[in-house]
Image (spheres, rainbow, N blue to C red):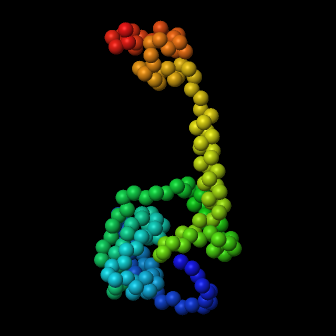
Amino acid sequence: MAITEVKRNVNINRSKVEFICPVCKSKKSLEIPKTVISEAKQLTTMSIARGLVCEHQFQAFVDKNFQVRGYQRVDFEFENKSNDEKNSDLNINKQGDIGLFENLILEGNYVEYTPKEILKKNYNQQINRKTNFQKKKMSLEDIYNEFWEFIDENNEKFRVFINNDSRRNQNPLFH
């Protein structure tokens, strides 16, 4: 999708639609651009994000008359944001429209706003997790205890552990 020109003071006709959460039955009216509904052939599927109506995420099916015809709960949602990240998102949004278009992801009718600061923070957290994992070193005894049944009786590195292991002495497979 390409924006060929910027129009100022564009009047977008909107219509209010009342949504009811299928989980907790909370109600809220949201404004929807009329073009979204009028351009659809039948029902329009709308994803209602967590926090718009209540704490749940769900889908609503809206007909040409702006009437909700049904709902669907979301069984699983990919999300990787801690409360600190959500709060920092709000603080970044309050700073104004500087760099807004640099941080928009536009694909078809999908729009996502992901500031580069958040992406950088997520990347740094992933790197920290990897390095923390790499720092964990197991002792020779830990390795033996974890994999003892796969270690050959004649293995010289684990000889001390093999000789003192009561599990091997009790198990006829290891004699």
Q: Quadrant of residue 102?
A: bottom right
Q: In the image, is residue 100 above or below residue 5?
A: above
Q: Position of residue 151 (x, y in %)?
A: 45, 19
Q: Quadrant of residue 103?
A: bottom right
Q: Quadrant of residue 70?
A: bottom left
Q: Position of residue 97 (x, y in %)?
A: 66, 75
Q: Position of residue 170 (x, y in %)?
A: 36, 10
Q: In the image, is residue 91 above or below residue 98?
A: above
Q: Is residue 120 left or right of residue 18?
A: right
Who is closer to the viewer here, 54 or 143?
Answer: 143
- Image quadrant holding the C terminus, namely top left
Report if residue 17 is visible in the image.
Answer: yes
Who is closer to the viewer here, 67 or 124?
Answer: 124
Q: In the image, is residue 60 above or below residue 166?
A: below
**Which residue lies at the image location 43% right of the left edge and 82% below the top edge?**
36
**Which residue lies at the image location 59% right of the left edge and 29% below the top edge?**
137
Report if residue 161 is visible in the image.
Answer: no
Count the labels in the image: 0
Who is closer to the viewer here, 50 or 34?
Answer: 34
**Which residue lies at the image location 33% right of the left edge and 11% below the top edge?**
172
Q: Position of residue 140 (x, y in %)?
A: 56, 20
Q: Is residue 122 left or right of residue 155?
A: right
